[in-house]
Amino acid sequence: MIHKPLKTVSLGFGAAMVTSVSFALIQPQLGEPPAGLTQAVERNLTEISQDLVSQSRLAVERVIDHEIQPGQTLSEIFQLYSLNLKDLGQLLNTPEAKAFHRIKAGKRLQFTIAESGVLRELSYLKNALEKLVAVRDQQGFTCQWQRALITMTPVTAKAVIHHSLFADGQQAGIPRRVLAQLADIFAYDIDFAHELQPGDAFKLVYEQGQADGHDVYPGRILAAEFKAQGKTYQAVYFADKSGQGAYYRPDGRSLRTAFLRSPVEFARISSHFNLHRKHPVLNKIRAHKGVDYAAPTGTPIKTTAEGKIAFQGWKGGYGRCVIVQHGEHYSTLYGHLSRFQRNLHVGKAVKQGQVIGYIGQSGLATGPHLHYEFRVDGVHKNPLTVALPNAPAITRSQWASFQQQAQSQLQQLEAVQIAQN
């Protein structure tokens, strides 16, 4: 097998010599050949010979796929496969080869080695999408990053709630990243902290990224339906001509409201809005003008709407407290924090969903929780029931395009059947 290509190469060169000689013998009888013909013939024969040599070389190359073990160095791996350490030194001196200095256990290396034992190519697979490739050339090695081509394919998924959104969703094979998107999409309608019940269910259509025939990371949710407490909520994704996208109800209304229902993800409500509650520390009737979310110390707290920080500091029984002003009429208060988020101060603008602090039990608190208040023109309202303003709906100019896209996505969603007990 090895000698056969080499014989073919030898015959190729022989053919080149015979052709050249024959041409020289008949040239005086035929006169001068057309300009450049001799050079063209010789160049073509040279290229053919080089191709044959290349094919011969490829036939005897071997490829080694190596999984990096804990504590293993690149030098040890080179010695394992009897590779020249001078090549390693030359490779590591290449400016682009920084990743080779920081190889990690569990990642893979691919070596392409010639029959002579010379390293021709080395690839470090950083992840399913990226790899650093070092190729031998006349100067030594040239390194460059290569990224796999990703294609997005719509896939469907479904799950029934028995314990929690994430536990049951992942049990059904749905990526955690997709479940987090789902929670964000319906965060304006469903308070996942306390409204989910066994038997609630959801189904969705989302994009699955693929590279080289393998699933990589999931993409965006295209359509979703959530049934919670006997109510059905639907969402479809739509992007305008500028590429700006958002989620809407099938009738074109935005799912996004000016405020999130909950400032803490998946926390337990330990105390509701109650104007006649007995205070657990003061032991007397004192209005509870907010909602308490019990969660471990350090749990992130998100502002429920964009606005500006009106107060940040210690505020009596509230302990460490943040008050955010949302325009002229609305404000929200976050109390009993363990600490504030860095780089925030009075007057600083914050976005909806931005982390502003972390749960604690500062002030008058019997355990770690967030005390959350919602005020309209200075009057306390129940955060769980107050009517929240919606974001803008689909415009008339967008309606035809939206309807066409929404119908297609909802048809895919309808085909997904959920067996509920």
Image: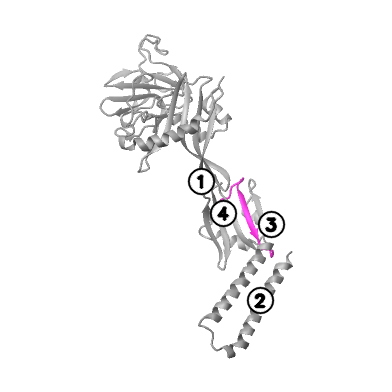
| Residue at figure coordinates x 67%, y 72% from the top left | 9
Q: Is residue 136 magenta?
A: no
| Contact check, label 1 and label 4, Cβ < 8 Å | no
> Is mark 2 in CB contact (under 8 Å) with mark 3?
no
The answer to which of marks 4 and 3 sits earlier in the sequence is 3
- Residue matched to label 4: 100
Dot 2 lies on which element? helix
For marks 2 and 4, give the CA distance. 41 Å
Category of crowding for the residue at label 2, using alpha-carbon neighbours closer than 10 angstroms: few (below 14), some (14–19), many (at least 20): some
Q: Residue at x 58, y 46 (%)?
A: 213
- The amino acid marked with disc number 3 is Tyr
Please provide percent x and percent y for residue 56.
67, 66
Depth check, front residue: 413 or 75: 413
- Which dot marks residue 81? 3
Q: Amino acid at mark 2?
A: Phe
- Tag 1 or tag 2, which sits nearer the N-term? 2
Q: List the residue tagged with mark 2.
A: 13
Q: Which residues are magenta?
A: 100-117
Residue under the point 53% across and 87% down: 32
Viewer-side label of 1, 4: 1
For label 1, the residue is 151
How far across and down, in percent of the image, does residue 390 sit?
A: 33, 27
